[in-house]
Protein backbone atom coordinates (compact mmCIF):
# COMPACT_ATOMS: atom_id res chain seq x y z
CA UNK A 1 0.00 0.00 0.00
CA UNK A 2 2.81 2.36 0.95
CA UNK A 3 4.69 1.62 -2.28
CA UNK A 4 1.54 2.23 -4.33
CA UNK A 5 1.04 5.58 -2.64
CA UNK A 6 4.68 6.44 -3.25
CA UNK A 7 4.39 5.57 -6.91
CA UNK A 8 1.16 7.57 -7.16
CA UNK A 9 2.78 10.60 -5.54
CA UNK A 10 5.77 10.34 -7.86
CA UNK A 11 3.49 10.14 -10.91
CA UNK A 12 1.53 13.19 -9.77
CA UNK A 13 4.75 15.08 -9.21
CA UNK A 14 6.00 14.26 -12.73
CA UNK A 15 2.67 15.33 -14.27
CA UNK A 16 2.74 18.71 -12.51
CA UNK A 17 6.39 19.57 -13.18
CA UNK A 18 5.62 22.25 -15.76
CA UNK A 19 3.92 24.28 -13.00
CA UNK A 20 6.98 24.19 -10.74
CA UNK A 21 9.89 26.68 -10.72
CA UNK A 22 12.65 25.65 -13.17
CA UNK A 23 15.10 24.95 -10.32
CA UNK A 24 12.75 22.38 -8.76
CA UNK A 25 12.01 20.86 -12.14
CA UNK A 26 15.74 20.37 -12.70
CA UNK A 27 16.12 18.62 -9.33
CA UNK A 28 13.25 16.28 -10.17
CA UNK A 29 14.94 15.41 -13.46
CA UNK A 30 18.15 14.50 -11.63
CA UNK A 31 16.25 12.42 -9.08
CA UNK A 32 14.43 10.56 -11.83
CA UNK A 33 17.72 9.39 -13.33
CA UNK A 34 19.13 8.39 -9.93
CA UNK A 35 16.28 5.90 -9.59
CA UNK A 36 17.44 4.09 -12.74
CA UNK A 37 19.91 1.30 -12.00
CA UNK A 38 22.65 0.59 -14.54
CA UNK A 39 23.58 -3.01 -15.35
CA UNK A 40 26.53 -4.66 -13.69
CA UNK A 41 28.43 -5.01 -16.96
CA UNK A 42 29.06 -1.70 -18.74
CA UNK A 43 30.09 -1.71 -22.38
CA UNK A 44 31.22 1.27 -24.39
CA UNK A 45 29.48 1.99 -27.67
CA UNK A 46 31.60 0.84 -30.59
CA UNK A 47 32.14 3.84 -32.81
CA UNK A 48 34.20 3.06 -35.93
CA UNK A 49 36.86 5.39 -37.15
CA UNK A 50 36.87 6.96 -40.59
CA UNK A 51 38.72 9.57 -42.59
CA UNK A 52 35.61 11.43 -43.73
CA UNK A 53 33.77 13.93 -41.52
CA UNK A 54 31.41 12.00 -39.31
CA UNK A 55 28.06 13.01 -37.84
CA UNK A 56 26.47 11.39 -34.80
CA UNK A 57 22.68 11.47 -34.45
CA UNK A 58 21.51 10.52 -30.94
CA UNK A 59 19.82 9.34 -28.74
CA UNK A 60 16.06 9.10 -29.60
CA UNK A 61 15.68 7.47 -33.05
CA UNK A 62 11.90 7.95 -32.94
CA UNK A 63 10.19 6.02 -35.75
CA UNK A 64 13.69 4.96 -36.84
CA UNK A 65 14.37 8.47 -38.14
CA UNK A 66 17.80 8.87 -36.54
CA UNK A 67 18.96 5.81 -38.45
CA UNK A 68 17.19 6.91 -41.64
CA UNK A 69 18.78 10.38 -41.54
CA UNK A 70 22.20 8.80 -41.00
CA UNK A 71 21.63 6.49 -43.97
CA UNK A 72 20.58 9.45 -46.11
CA UNK A 73 23.76 11.34 -45.19
CA UNK A 74 25.85 8.27 -45.98
CA UNK A 75 24.20 7.82 -49.36
CA UNK A 76 23.81 11.41 -50.50
CA UNK A 77 25.83 13.66 -48.18
CA UNK A 78 29.40 14.88 -48.27
CA UNK A 79 30.39 12.87 -45.20
CA UNK A 80 29.29 9.87 -43.20
CA UNK A 81 27.00 9.44 -40.23
CA UNK A 82 25.79 6.95 -37.63
CA UNK A 83 22.97 6.98 -35.15
CA UNK A 84 23.11 5.88 -31.55
CA UNK A 85 19.99 5.18 -29.51
CA UNK A 86 19.21 4.46 -25.89
CA UNK A 87 16.30 2.05 -25.67
CA UNK A 88 14.28 0.36 -22.94
CA UNK A 89 12.67 -2.44 -24.95
CA UNK A 90 11.89 -1.51 -28.55
CA UNK A 91 8.50 -2.81 -29.68
CA UNK A 92 8.47 -1.76 -33.30
CA UNK A 93 11.93 -3.03 -34.20
CA UNK A 94 13.33 0.14 -35.74
CA UNK A 95 16.82 -0.19 -37.16
CA UNK A 96 19.75 1.53 -35.43
CA UNK A 97 23.50 1.59 -35.87
CA UNK A 98 24.24 1.35 -32.14
CA UNK A 99 21.82 0.57 -29.32
CA UNK A 100 22.43 0.79 -25.59
CA UNK A 101 20.03 0.25 -22.69
CA UNK A 102 18.46 3.40 -21.25
CA UNK A 103 19.72 2.47 -17.78
CA UNK A 104 23.25 3.41 -18.86
CA UNK A 105 22.16 7.01 -18.29
CA UNK A 106 22.70 6.31 -14.59
CA UNK A 107 26.14 4.73 -15.06
CA UNK A 108 29.18 6.16 -13.20
CA UNK A 109 30.78 9.36 -14.46
CA UNK A 110 33.95 7.45 -15.38
CA UNK A 111 31.93 5.41 -17.86
CA UNK A 112 30.22 8.51 -19.27
CA UNK A 113 33.60 10.24 -19.60
CA UNK A 114 34.80 7.37 -21.76
CA UNK A 115 31.65 7.68 -23.90
CA UNK A 116 32.29 11.41 -24.25
CA UNK A 117 35.90 10.78 -25.31
CA UNK A 118 34.70 8.35 -28.01
CA UNK A 119 32.38 10.97 -29.45
CA UNK A 120 34.86 13.84 -29.39
CA UNK A 121 37.61 11.65 -30.87
CA UNK A 122 35.58 10.21 -33.75
CA UNK A 123 32.99 12.81 -34.72
CA UNK A 124 32.96 16.32 -36.05
CA UNK A 125 29.25 17.01 -35.69
CA UNK A 126 26.50 15.89 -33.32
CA UNK A 127 22.73 16.15 -33.78
CA UNK A 128 21.08 15.96 -30.36
CA UNK A 129 17.51 14.66 -30.58
CA UNK A 130 14.54 15.65 -28.46
CA UNK A 131 16.40 17.41 -25.66
CA UNK A 132 17.61 14.07 -24.34
CA UNK A 133 21.08 13.71 -22.81
CA UNK A 134 23.65 11.38 -24.33
CA UNK A 135 26.22 11.28 -21.52
CA UNK A 136 24.03 10.65 -18.49
CA UNK A 137 25.21 12.17 -15.25
CA UNK A 138 28.47 13.50 -16.74
CA UNK A 139 26.82 16.89 -17.31
CA UNK A 140 23.96 16.50 -14.85
CA UNK A 141 21.62 14.73 -17.29
CA UNK A 142 21.37 18.02 -19.16
CA UNK A 143 21.28 17.95 -22.97
CA UNK A 144 21.72 21.74 -22.99
CA UNK A 145 24.99 21.51 -21.06
CA UNK A 146 26.14 18.65 -23.30
CA UNK A 147 25.42 20.75 -26.39
CA UNK A 148 27.43 23.68 -25.05
CA UNK A 149 30.39 21.51 -24.00
CA UNK A 150 30.48 19.68 -27.33
CA UNK A 151 30.38 23.00 -29.11
CA UNK A 152 33.13 24.40 -26.89
CA UNK A 153 35.50 21.51 -27.68
CA UNK A 154 35.08 22.10 -31.41
CA UNK A 155 32.18 19.93 -32.58
CA UNK A 156 29.36 21.36 -34.65
CA UNK A 157 26.12 20.81 -32.75
CA UNK A 158 22.49 20.93 -33.86
CA UNK A 159 19.34 20.31 -31.85
CA UNK A 160 16.56 18.29 -33.51
CA UNK A 161 12.90 18.07 -32.47
CA UNK A 162 10.58 15.23 -33.53
CA UNK A 163 7.22 16.60 -32.37
CA UNK A 164 5.81 15.73 -28.95
CA UNK A 165 9.17 16.63 -27.42
CA UNK A 166 8.58 20.34 -28.21
CA UNK A 167 4.90 20.64 -29.20
CA UNK A 168 2.72 22.08 -26.41
CA UNK A 169 -0.50 20.09 -25.93
CA UNK A 170 -2.17 23.15 -24.42
CA UNK A 171 -1.52 25.14 -27.60
CA UNK A 172 -2.69 22.26 -29.78
CA UNK A 173 -5.94 21.98 -27.82
CA UNK A 174 -6.53 25.71 -28.30
CA UNK A 175 -6.14 25.49 -32.09
CA UNK A 176 -7.55 22.02 -32.93
CA UNK A 177 -11.12 21.06 -32.04
CA UNK A 178 -10.30 17.35 -32.39
CA UNK A 179 -6.97 17.52 -30.54
CA UNK A 180 -6.18 14.12 -28.96
CA UNK A 181 -4.71 15.88 -25.94
CA UNK A 182 -8.22 16.96 -24.89
CA UNK A 183 -9.43 13.35 -24.68
CA UNK A 184 -10.03 12.09 -21.15
CA UNK A 185 -7.81 8.96 -21.52
CA UNK A 186 -4.91 11.15 -22.63
CA UNK A 187 -5.11 13.94 -20.05
CA UNK A 188 -2.41 12.44 -17.85
CA UNK A 189 -0.18 11.83 -20.87
CA UNK A 190 -0.89 15.34 -22.16
CA UNK A 191 0.20 16.80 -18.82
CA UNK A 192 3.43 14.82 -18.97
CA UNK A 193 4.10 15.95 -22.56
CA UNK A 194 3.34 19.53 -21.56
CA UNK A 195 5.92 19.29 -18.80
CA UNK A 196 8.52 17.80 -21.13
CA UNK A 197 7.91 20.35 -23.89
CA UNK A 198 8.08 23.30 -21.47
CA UNK A 199 11.27 21.97 -19.91
CA UNK A 200 12.85 21.50 -23.35
CA UNK A 201 11.83 25.01 -24.36
CA UNK A 202 13.36 26.50 -21.23
CA UNK A 203 16.62 24.60 -21.55
CA UNK A 204 17.24 24.30 -25.30
CA UNK A 205 15.54 27.00 -27.38
CA UNK A 206 17.75 29.80 -26.09
CA UNK A 207 20.94 28.04 -27.23
CA UNK A 208 22.83 29.69 -30.08
CA UNK A 209 22.74 26.48 -32.10
CA UNK A 210 20.97 25.28 -35.22
CA UNK A 211 17.44 24.14 -34.31
CA UNK A 212 15.92 21.50 -36.61
CA UNK A 213 12.33 20.20 -36.75
CA UNK A 214 11.15 17.05 -38.50
CA UNK A 215 7.62 18.16 -39.44
CA UNK A 216 6.53 21.47 -41.02
CA UNK A 217 3.99 22.30 -38.30
CA UNK A 218 6.86 22.68 -35.82
CA UNK A 219 8.32 25.59 -37.76
CA UNK A 220 5.79 27.83 -36.02
CA UNK A 221 6.57 26.23 -32.64
CA UNK A 222 10.35 26.71 -32.73
CA UNK A 223 11.41 30.25 -33.73
CA UNK A 224 14.16 30.30 -36.35
CA UNK A 225 14.10 26.54 -36.87
CA UNK A 226 14.94 24.83 -40.14
CA UNK A 227 13.02 21.88 -41.53
CA UNK A 228 14.83 18.51 -41.56
CA UNK A 229 12.12 16.42 -43.25
CA UNK A 230 11.30 12.88 -42.24
CA UNK A 231 12.79 10.42 -44.70
CA UNK A 232 12.12 6.84 -45.74
CA UNK A 233 14.51 3.95 -46.08
CA UNK A 234 16.42 4.00 -49.36
CA UNK A 235 15.15 0.48 -50.07
CA UNK A 236 11.66 1.91 -50.60
CA UNK A 237 12.95 4.04 -53.46
CA UNK A 238 15.39 1.71 -55.21
CA UNK A 239 14.84 0.04 -58.58
CA UNK A 240 13.41 -3.12 -57.03
CA UNK A 241 10.80 -1.15 -55.12
CA UNK A 242 9.86 0.73 -58.28
CA UNK A 243 9.35 -2.56 -60.11
CA UNK A 244 7.03 -3.75 -57.35
CA UNK A 245 5.06 -0.51 -57.52
CA UNK A 246 4.69 -0.89 -61.27
CA UNK A 247 3.62 -4.54 -60.98
CA UNK A 248 1.00 -3.80 -58.31
CA UNK A 249 -0.11 -0.17 -58.70
CA UNK A 250 -2.73 1.20 -56.33
CA UNK A 251 -6.41 1.42 -57.29
CA UNK A 252 -6.22 -0.97 -60.23
CA UNK A 253 -8.52 -3.68 -58.91
CA UNK A 254 -9.86 -6.51 -60.99
CA UNK A 255 -13.65 -6.43 -61.43
CA UNK A 256 -15.47 -7.51 -58.29
CA UNK A 257 -12.45 -6.99 -56.04
CA UNK A 258 -12.79 -3.95 -53.74
CA UNK A 259 -9.82 -1.67 -52.97
CA UNK A 260 -7.85 -2.57 -49.88
CA UNK A 261 -7.90 0.19 -47.24
CA UNK A 262 -5.31 -0.14 -44.47
CA UNK A 263 -5.03 1.68 -41.14
CA UNK A 264 -2.03 0.96 -38.89
CA UNK A 265 -2.13 3.42 -35.96
CA UNK A 266 1.04 3.66 -33.89
CA UNK A 267 -1.23 5.16 -31.20
CA UNK A 268 -4.97 4.85 -31.90
CA UNK A 269 -6.01 7.74 -29.65
CA UNK A 270 -3.44 10.10 -31.16
CA UNK A 271 -4.21 9.03 -34.73
CA UNK A 272 -7.99 9.30 -34.34
CA UNK A 273 -8.75 5.64 -34.96
CA UNK A 274 -12.00 6.13 -33.03
CA UNK A 275 -13.09 8.58 -35.74
CA UNK A 276 -12.07 6.46 -38.73
CA UNK A 277 -12.64 2.86 -37.70
CA UNK A 278 -16.48 2.90 -37.48
CA UNK A 279 -16.69 4.55 -40.90
CA UNK A 280 -14.35 2.06 -42.52
CA UNK A 281 -16.13 -0.90 -40.94
CA UNK A 282 -19.44 0.30 -42.35
CA UNK A 283 -17.92 0.63 -45.80
CA UNK A 284 -16.43 -2.86 -45.51
CA UNK A 285 -19.81 -4.30 -44.47
CA UNK A 286 -21.30 -2.74 -47.60
CA UNK A 287 -18.65 -4.52 -49.66
CA UNK A 288 -17.12 -1.28 -50.96
CA UNK A 289 -13.67 -1.86 -49.45
CA UNK A 290 -11.44 -4.58 -48.05
CA UNK A 291 -10.57 -3.03 -44.69
CA UNK A 292 -7.51 -4.00 -42.61
CA UNK A 293 -6.82 -2.57 -39.15
CA UNK A 294 -3.51 -3.59 -37.57
CA UNK A 295 -1.93 -2.49 -34.28
CA UNK A 296 1.31 -3.27 -32.44
CA UNK A 297 3.17 -4.79 -35.40
CA UNK A 298 6.81 -4.33 -36.30
CA UNK A 299 8.07 -1.62 -38.63
CA UNK A 300 8.86 -4.26 -41.27
CA UNK A 301 5.34 -5.69 -41.04
CA UNK A 302 3.88 -2.21 -41.43
CA UNK A 303 5.73 -1.75 -44.72
CA UNK A 304 4.54 -5.12 -45.99
CA UNK A 305 0.96 -4.18 -45.18
CA UNK A 306 1.29 -0.77 -46.85
CA UNK A 307 2.69 -2.45 -49.96
CA UNK A 308 -0.47 -4.56 -50.19
CA UNK A 309 -2.81 -1.58 -49.81
CA UNK A 310 -4.57 0.71 -52.25
CA UNK A 311 -5.37 3.37 -49.67
CA UNK A 312 -3.58 4.08 -46.38
CA UNK A 313 -5.57 5.92 -43.70
CA UNK A 314 -3.22 8.02 -41.57
CA UNK A 315 -4.59 10.43 -38.92
CA UNK A 316 -7.48 12.79 -38.09
CA UNK A 317 -6.52 14.60 -34.89
CA UNK A 318 -3.02 16.08 -35.06
CA UNK A 319 -3.24 17.95 -38.38
CA UNK A 320 0.21 16.80 -39.52
CA UNK A 321 1.85 14.10 -41.62
CA UNK A 322 4.85 12.06 -40.57
CA UNK A 323 6.89 8.96 -41.27
CA UNK A 324 3.91 6.64 -41.82
CA UNK A 325 2.46 8.84 -44.56
CA UNK A 326 5.87 9.28 -46.21
CA UNK A 327 6.44 5.51 -46.25
CA UNK A 328 3.01 4.83 -47.72
CA UNK A 329 3.53 7.43 -50.45
CA UNK A 330 6.98 6.03 -51.23
CA UNK A 331 5.30 2.67 -51.76
CA UNK A 332 2.93 4.25 -54.25
CA UNK A 333 -0.16 4.13 -52.03
CA UNK A 334 -2.86 6.82 -51.73
CA UNK A 335 -2.70 8.47 -48.29
CA UNK A 336 -5.95 9.83 -46.86
CA UNK A 337 -5.49 12.07 -43.83
CA UNK A 338 -6.51 15.37 -42.21
CA UNK A 339 -3.56 17.75 -42.58
CA UNK A 340 -3.63 21.44 -41.62
CA UNK A 341 -3.58 23.96 -44.42
CA UNK A 342 -0.56 25.60 -42.76
CA UNK A 343 1.38 22.36 -43.33
CA UNK A 344 0.46 22.32 -47.02
CA UNK A 345 1.52 25.99 -47.22
CA UNK A 346 4.86 25.34 -45.51
CA UNK A 347 5.68 22.46 -47.87
CA UNK A 348 4.70 24.55 -50.89
CA UNK A 349 6.77 27.53 -49.74
CA UNK A 350 9.92 25.49 -49.13
CA UNK A 351 9.78 22.98 -51.97
CA UNK A 352 7.50 24.44 -54.64
CA UNK A 353 5.56 21.15 -54.49
CA UNK A 354 2.07 20.29 -53.30
CA UNK A 355 1.98 17.78 -50.47
CA UNK A 356 0.49 14.64 -52.11
CA UNK A 357 -1.79 13.72 -49.21
CA UNK A 358 -5.51 13.41 -49.95
CA UNK A 359 -6.82 16.01 -47.50
CA UNK A 360 -9.89 14.62 -45.72
CA UNK A 361 -11.41 15.61 -42.36
CA UNK A 362 -12.87 12.76 -40.33
CA UNK A 363 -16.41 14.02 -40.97
CA UNK A 364 -15.86 13.61 -44.73
CA UNK A 365 -14.06 10.27 -44.67
CA UNK A 366 -17.03 8.16 -45.75
CA UNK A 367 -17.79 10.46 -48.68
CA UNK A 368 -14.12 10.48 -49.69
CA UNK A 369 -13.75 6.69 -49.71
CA UNK A 370 -16.97 6.31 -51.65
CA UNK A 371 -15.67 8.76 -54.24
CA UNK A 372 -12.37 6.89 -54.50
CA UNK A 373 -14.28 3.68 -55.15
CA UNK A 374 -16.54 5.26 -57.78
CA UNK A 375 -13.89 7.32 -59.56
CA UNK A 376 -10.37 6.00 -58.84
CA UNK A 377 -8.51 7.53 -61.80
CA UNK A 378 -7.90 11.05 -60.34
CA UNK A 379 -6.72 9.49 -57.09
CA UNK A 380 -4.54 7.00 -58.93
CA UNK A 381 -2.74 9.90 -60.65
Image (cartoon, rainbow, N blue to C red):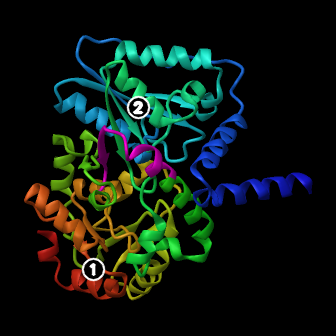
Q: Check the image and report above or below for 263 versus 144.
A: below
Q: Secondary structure at mark 2?
A: helix
**Residue 156 is drawn in which quadrant?**
top left
Instruction: Point out residue 10 in the picture as x, y percentages from the top left corner.
Output: 74, 53
In the foreground, 355 or 341:
341
Instruction: Point out residue 219 in the picture as x, y percentages from the top left corner.
Output: 27, 57
**Residue 189 is drawn in which quadrant?**
bottom right
For residue 347, side relative to residue 102 (left or right): left
In the foreground, 339 or 259:
339
Q: Which mark is residue 288?
A: none
Which range is magenta? 199-215
For label 2, the crowd category at 10 Å Cα-Cα, with few meaning under 14, some 14 to 19 and many 20 or more, is: many
Q: Residue at x 41, y 48 (%)?
A: 63
For residue 141, side relative to residue 171 (left or right): right
For residue 321, side relative to residue 202 (left or right): left
Quarter holding the C terminus is bottom left
Residue mark closest to the camera, 2 vs 1: 2
Q: Residue at x 72, y 31 (%)?
A: 37
Q: Which residue is mark 2?
A: 147
Q: Which residue is mark 1?
A: 256
Q: Check the image and report above or below for 289 versus 135.
A: below
For residue 361, side relative to residue 23 (left or right): left
Quarter holding the N terminus is bottom right
Amino acid sequence: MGRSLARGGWSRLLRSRHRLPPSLDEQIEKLKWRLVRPPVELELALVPTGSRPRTLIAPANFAGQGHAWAEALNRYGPGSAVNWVFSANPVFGFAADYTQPICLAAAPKSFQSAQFALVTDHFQAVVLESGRPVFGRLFGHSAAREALVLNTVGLTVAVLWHGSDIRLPSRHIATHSLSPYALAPLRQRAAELESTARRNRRSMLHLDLLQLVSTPDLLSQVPGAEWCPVVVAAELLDSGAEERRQSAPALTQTPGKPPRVVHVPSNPLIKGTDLADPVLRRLAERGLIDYVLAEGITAAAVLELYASADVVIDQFRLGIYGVAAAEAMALGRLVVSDVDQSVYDAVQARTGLTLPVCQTPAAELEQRIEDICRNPEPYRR
